[in-house]
Image (cartoon, helix red, strand yellow):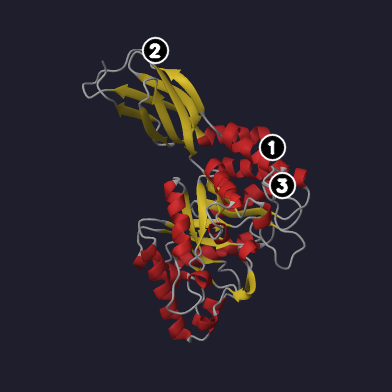
Amino acid sequence: MFLDDADLDVRIRRLRKGNFTVKFVDAEGTAPPAGTKIAYRMTRLGFDLGTVLYWSIFKRPEIDIDRRNYLEKINGYFNTVVIPIFWHRMEPEQGKPDADTPLQIWQWCHDHRKATLGHAIFYGWDGPDDIDPADASKDLNFIQPWVRGLGKQGLEKAMKARLQRVLSLFDGKISDFVLSNELLNPKDYYLRVLGFENGAPYFKWAKATAPNATFYVNENGGILTGDKAEKYAEMMCVLIEAGAEVGAIGIQGHFFGDTVPQNEELWSRLDMLSEFGLPIKMTEFGVRTKDEEQYAEDMQRFYRLCFGHPSVTGIIRWGIWEPEMWPHVGVPIPEAPLWRKDWSNTPAGEAYVKLVTNEWNTLGIGELDQEGGLRFHGFFGTYQLTMMDGREYVIEFTPSVTNVTLRIDCVR
């Protein structure tokens, strides 16, 4: 197995690019004259490039310069956003749900055409909140005091109500959710109190409520670097055998060492999980290191490897800006950012921008042939096509859709 840069480039070209044809004709089947120039520009790569969008950013006033810079970076360089929907944040007091902030984040994503992932409906880790470092409180626990006061039956009733509320709130808005985060945790509070052997009941509740939504499993460190890949695969088998309709596999991708493992090790673990035939998404990428140059190299290598693997559908970072990087509790340094506190680029920031705007981008100007066809080679994704008279059209190319006929206004 060759997984150096040259080999990955070949894999990426074969997997992520295609030859496209767009035929321009009017209602009568007449094509514009041969030689007519058409500009084409990719507006969204057919692969999720995302980051989390913290509540604390939206709690800043709209005129706040850091909020504006943060959102500009996300809008310019990312096509997917994780919206935090943790229960302890949305319902700190029983019967008093607060959805204002996640709805504001969703509205921003909708207005800027970002795909979204709701994270997470349940999270049974019994510890302090350090998810949003700039807004974290050691007094805020993932398991609310009022939830602790519920017995088994009361907890199940509350969890079903929470599930119904979230899926109703985001119906028609968010279609992808991390259902229960880190089910492999042997101390998962909900599983322990409910007495469930696994999280299969959650998936049955969820599918009964929102049959068209996609529900992820999502696991933490050790999947790509330790001994948890086999355990993750075993858990998937148990869930599927129990009738759980798992829609996608999430891998958090927090690397707690100074570097990212070698490509062969990463690829073999992805291959193991790809046996289930489900999309795999890196949901929380980050590396805890002070070595900026090494991080830039490792980040590019990791992104290229994931982009070249046929089962991986996207990479979502867990933060981009130095003050917002996770975690700020109990560790000497947080994960490495793309942009420093003053918004200057880190080496990784420069590398990331170059990767997504240059290397993995497609744009150009072509000419129509005698049949009114525009032909070009590019990455799968969404494109804006612009005729010289200003008329614009939007087309999405996928591995199964590479030839499209556009009906345009009458050709004169």
Is residue 383 shown above or below 229?
A: above
Mark positioned earlier in the residue sequence (2 or 3): 2
Circles 3 and 1: CB atoms closer than 8 Å: no
Q: What residue type is labelled 3?
A: Gln
Taking the spot 55% from the left edge, 44% from the top edge, the residue there is: 72
Residue denoted by label 1: 4
Say which of 338 and 125 sits in front: 338
- Report helix, strand or loop for mark 3: loop
Say which of 208 and 76 sits in front: 76
Taking the spot 63% from the left edge, 58% from the top edge, the residue there is: 223
Residue denoted by label 3: 262
Gap between marks 3 and 1 measured at Cα:
10 Å
User: Going by the image, does 328 lie left or right of 18?
Assistant: right
Mark positioned earlier in the residue sequence (3 or 1): 1
Q: Which amino acid does label 2 sit on?
A: Gly
User: Going by the image, does 250 lie left or right of 407?
Assistant: right
Q: Position of residue 150 (x, y in %)?
A: 48, 85
Specify whether residue 247 is in view. no
Mark positioned earlier in the residue sequence (2 or 1): 1
Residue denoted by label 2: 35
Taking the spot 41% from the left edge, 80% from the top edge, the residue there is: 157
Gap between marks 2 and 3 measured at Cα:
49 Å
